[in-house]
Amino acid sequence: MKINWGTGIVLAFIGFISFILFFVVRMSMDHKANHDLVTENYYKAELGYQTEIDAENNALAKEAELSINKTPDGLILQFPKNLDFKEIKGSVSLYRPSNKHLDFDLPISLSQDYLLIPDNRLLDGRWDIKVSWEYKGEAYLFKEKTTYYKN
């Protein structure tokens, strides 16, 4: 049987489409591939995004920016010196983009003007840090992406 060039092109298209569909089906059925959203309840979190923007702008306007310092003991979140640290309430969320099982939250309870995130809670790699805090009834927010490596 002789195949003309038109039939050959059609067979090549069918072969290529079958090849692509095989990999699409295989990847969508594979349980090793992670298809999760970035955060749980993504759409619900999106509705509260404007309050986050207002809290971030509040921190910038009132010069209440935090700083992060790496030490052998871990990460130190330094709160502004001009604030009474006893009145600061809130939480620190550490988010690991590569593995949601490593995410954790810490409550802010200060005995000094800084908060230490211990070295034993952190693995090497990228961390997204989000500090939501309140001082005298006003909300503040600090976000930073950092790469942490143990010494």
Image (cartoon, rainbow, N blue to C red):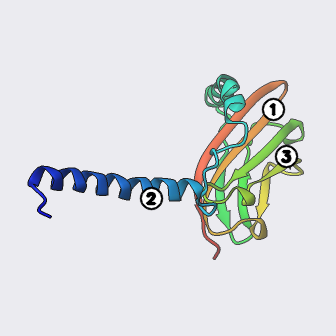
Residue 126, image x and y in percent?
59, 59
Q: Residue furthest front?
A: 1
Q: Residue at x 30, y 52 (%)?
A: 14
The disc labelled 1 sits on which kind of residue? Answer: Glu
Write down the quadrant of residue 124 in the picture.
Answer: bottom right
Q: Residue furthest bottom?
A: 151
> In this image, 38 relative to 4: left or right?
right
Quadrant in which the N terminus is drawn: bottom left
Task: Say which element carries label 2.
Answer: helix
Q: Residue at x 68, y 67 (%)?
A: 71
Q: Which residue is mark 3?
A: 108
Q: Which residue is mark 1?
A: 134
The disc labelled 2 sits on which kind of residue? Answer: Phe
Instruction: Determine the CA span between mark 1 and mark 3.
Output: 10 Å
Q: Is residue 106 above or below residue 41?
A: below
Near mark 3 (Cα within 10 A), the count class, few <14, some 14-19 or many ≥20, is some
Q: Nearer the viewer, residue 26 or 66?
A: 26
Residue 9, image x and y in percent?
17, 52
Quadrant in which the C terminus is drawn: bottom right
Residue 73, image x and y in percent?
75, 69
Lower position in the chain sequence, tag 1 or tag 3: 3
Instruction: Determine the CA span between mark 1 and mark 2.
Output: 50 Å
Write down the quadrant of residue 40 in the picture.
Answer: top right
Foreground mark, 3 or 2, reads: 2
Foreground mark, 1 or 2, reads: 2
Near mark 2 (Cα within 10 A), the count class, few <14, some 14-19 or many ≥20, is few
User: In this view of the protein, can residue 80 be seen by the observer?
Assistant: no
Q: Residue at x 12, y 49 (%)?
A: 6
